[in-house]
Image (tube, rainbow, N blue to C red):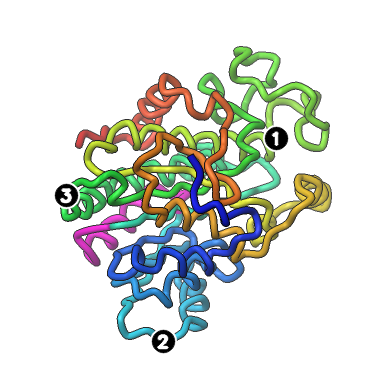
Amino acid sequence: MATNPHFGATTTATEVASTFSSYVTGKTILIVGVSPNSLGQHLVQALVPHNPYLLILASRSLKNINLVTSSLPQNEKTMVKAVEIDLSFQSSIREAAKTVKGLTEKLDLVFNVAAVNVQGKEMTEDGLEMHFGTNYIGFFLLTNLLIPEVKNAAREKGKRAGATRIVNFTSAGHRLSPIRFSDLNFTKPSSELPEEERPPQGLSKAVYDPEKGGYSSFVAYAQSKTGNILFSVALRERFKKEGILAISVHPGSIWTNLARNLDEEGKDVVKNTSKVWKTGDQGAATGLVAGLYPRLGETEEVYMSDCQFAKAASFATDVSITERLWEVSEELVGQRFIF
């Protein structure tokens, strides 16, 4: 199954929003990860002209949100609210979820966009490797806290397939790492891991050097992005019958602020990952197709790239791995989610 056959790598979010304008009008939409020169900013810019009812924009900095909203065209039909959140702090995530709940009783669309990419090994305040703790666990906790609001929106639409959606931004780079269940925090060299948890063979030393021990920022980032896809699979398994669909999207290669913490060697590696570099508007397009394409509920696909369905690594879509990761994640956030 394909989406709009005219959509591809060069399609823009502006085009997608115009094509599916009627699916934007009147919606309550949460976008997590909104700052200047971000994919979140381009999502906002594409959506505002089509009259969503409420846009809730979340970022680590309210200043960043204000910089984005100050550049938007005036639209009296759309309310815009700002929420401060630091996805690397579970306490901040819980406070942000309370704030969102105070703004609305329903969420039609959730775009989980934000991510960190740090060069050296860092840990969150909750004791997790920074990429995994922020890019994956952060969204696992926030999304689950807001599932009641997503369910309310689906119920309002009669639980129609794909009535409400959760779009998790991931990366094609997820292929560099499965989930390291025996070593989530990267304390061991890959030779000490079970075969199924090791990075693929043949990686350049700039990406992963086994002689330097267990840590690689590229592999750590990849593990978090594998987690995003597995999370989409888990959400779909749990909530599809209630009209809620989740899907992960690879936005393509875009030079955004995500690379701001890389050293020159890291930037060189990133530059060589793709021959095609997208604008921010093009990078946000696949996320909007996932959020707005009306026939999404007819497919079992959970991963998209270049505005079409694509194939993720098998370790990122295995349901048994999904369930194992869900249980581990509940332990890491100290809460079971029973809906």
Q: Which residues, given as a range, are shown in magenta?
A: 87-107
Pointer 1 local density, CA inside 10 Å: few below 14, some 14–19, many at least 20: many
Q: Secondary structure at mark 1?
A: loop
Where residue 216 is drawn, which disc sits there? 1
Question: Distance of mark 3 from mark 1, alpha carbons?
Answer: 46 Å
Q: Secondary structure at mark 2?
A: loop
Q: Position of residue 308 (x, y in %)?
A: 54, 46
Q: Which residue is mark 3?
A: 158
In the image, farthest residue toward the front = 5
Q: Position of residue 204 (x, y in %)?
A: 82, 32
> Is residue 260 among what the camera can see?
no
**Which callout, 3 or 1, points at the residue further toward the start of the chain?**
3
Q: Amino acid at mark 2?
A: Gln
Res. 37 image quadrant: bottom right
User: Which residue sits at x=28%, y=62%?
Assistant: 99
Q: The residue tagged with tag 3: helix, strand or loop? A: loop
Earlier in the chain: of badge 1 and badge 2, it is 2
Residue at the image point whose x is 57% and y is 33% from the top: 311
* Residue 317 versus residue 72 in the image, above or below: above
Residue 137 locus on image (x, y percent): 44, 40
**Main SS category, magenta section:** helix
Image check: 181 left or right of 26? right
Please state which of residues 299 and 253 is positioned toward the viewer in this rendering. Answer: 299
Classify residue 186 by image quadrant. Answer: top right
